[in-house]
Image (cartoon, grey):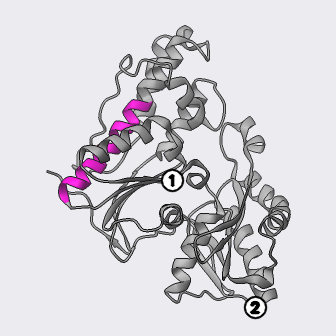
Amino acid sequence: MRYLLGIESSCDDTSIAVVAEDRSILANVVSSQVQEHAPYLGVVPELAGRAHLKNIPAVYRKAMDDAGLSLENMTAIAVTAGPGLAGSLMVGVNFAKGLAMGAGLPLIGVNHIGGHVAALFLEYGEIPLPALALIVSGGHTHLFRVRENRELVLLTKSRDDAAGEAYDKLSKMLGLGFPGGPLIDRLARRGNPKRYAFSKPKFSDGSLDFSFSGMKTAASRHIERDPEAFRDPDGEAVRDLAASFQAAVCRHLLDRVSLGLDQDAAQALLLGGGVACNSHLRTEFEALAQSRGLPAFISSPKLSTDNAAMIAAEGWRLFHLGRRDELDLVTDVSAKPYAAVDLLRKT
């Protein structure tokens, strides 16, 4: 059996994993930085880079111990090269270079968003293709067509905030804490999703991009109209706003997925990224797939948030395609995982 070491440090989670060629996950260690960033209600790039630098040696040792293997057992090393925060990416890539050079192993730079797609294939194995993949996280909101050869074709993406970022900003407005997604999700389960109105995003140029900044502004205005009602973080107004906001975000996401299905045939629907942990989105995504007679493949929570197993999975795919990178591999904070663009068309 051959094994691949994956390294992920694109944002605020330091992760190292060992994944076998048969898709077995022998180790997937994740060190969270929530405590470092919580006082600031968001990720502070400089703090993230420093934390990665401090944490990565211990995360590496833990991953090797969990796998019961050593670097000499590895076939290659895959590392996130982008997109992400510059300092965070640099820590992971330089660590990977050192290991690769010391052990004489092939080095493979991996796109972080492509890793989220690969996580679905790691978890489920064979997935009917072509498919539509919705990747939603704190930093990314993309809808792809996944071709039979696993090539990603971009259909649309957010032109402003990512969906997860919008959740964090609403949480900050309400004084709930960070990260906002899980907090909003829990409150929304006990709220009325019809109490507060959120209009559907529209652009004068007819674009079918995702957009969440308008929803953030609408939420702010709801709070400004009656600030006293929102002082209790577990009060009815807060729960109802959370539910209304969450319902609007999910409607917008699934509206674009529906348009994608209307315009091109697909054999499956895929959902990945950290926001795939959201309970309402998971339920509504499955309902949409069922209404279209398609199977839905949704990442489990442990493979939805940033982790190195997904990077190793994409690394294996690239390894078998013959991909190898030199030790001068550079990071790219805005790297794109798609080889072609075929935007959604206005109907």
Over which residues does the magenta segment extend? Answer: 246-263
Most common secondary structure along the magenta stretch: helix
Q: What residue appears at the point 24 percent right and 48 percent down from the top-left corner?
A: 292
Which is in the foreground here, disc 1 or disc 2? 1
Q: Is residue 285 left or right of residue 203?
A: right
Query: Along the horizontal axis of the image, is 178 left or right of 99?
Result: left
Q: Position of residue 50 (x, y in %)?
A: 80, 57
Crowd band around label 1 with a 10 angstrom C-alpha radius: few (<14), some (14–19), many (20+): many
294 or 188, nearer to the observer: 294
Q: What mark, if any, has residue 264 been given in the picture?
A: none
Identified by mark 1, the residue type is Ser
Q: Is residue 137 magenta?
A: no
**Can residue 261 be found in the magenta stretch?**
yes
**Residue type for callout 2:** Gly
Residue nearest the viewer, comparing 220 with 21: 21
**From what the image shows, is residue 280 above or below residue 45?**
above
Q: CA distance from mark 1 to mark 2?
A: 33 Å
Give x and y (percent) for residue 151: 38, 74
Q: Position of residue 307 (x, y in %)?
A: 64, 59
Residues packed near mark 2 inside 10 Å, few (<14), some (14 to 19) or many (20 plus):
few
The image's mark for residue 299 is: 1
Q: Relative to residue 138, is residue 255 drawn left or right? A: left
Residue at mark 2? 104
Residue drawn 23% across the image and 45% down it: 204
Q: Is residue 152 left or right of residue 172?
A: left
Which residue of the protein is positioned furthest toward the top in this rendering? 228
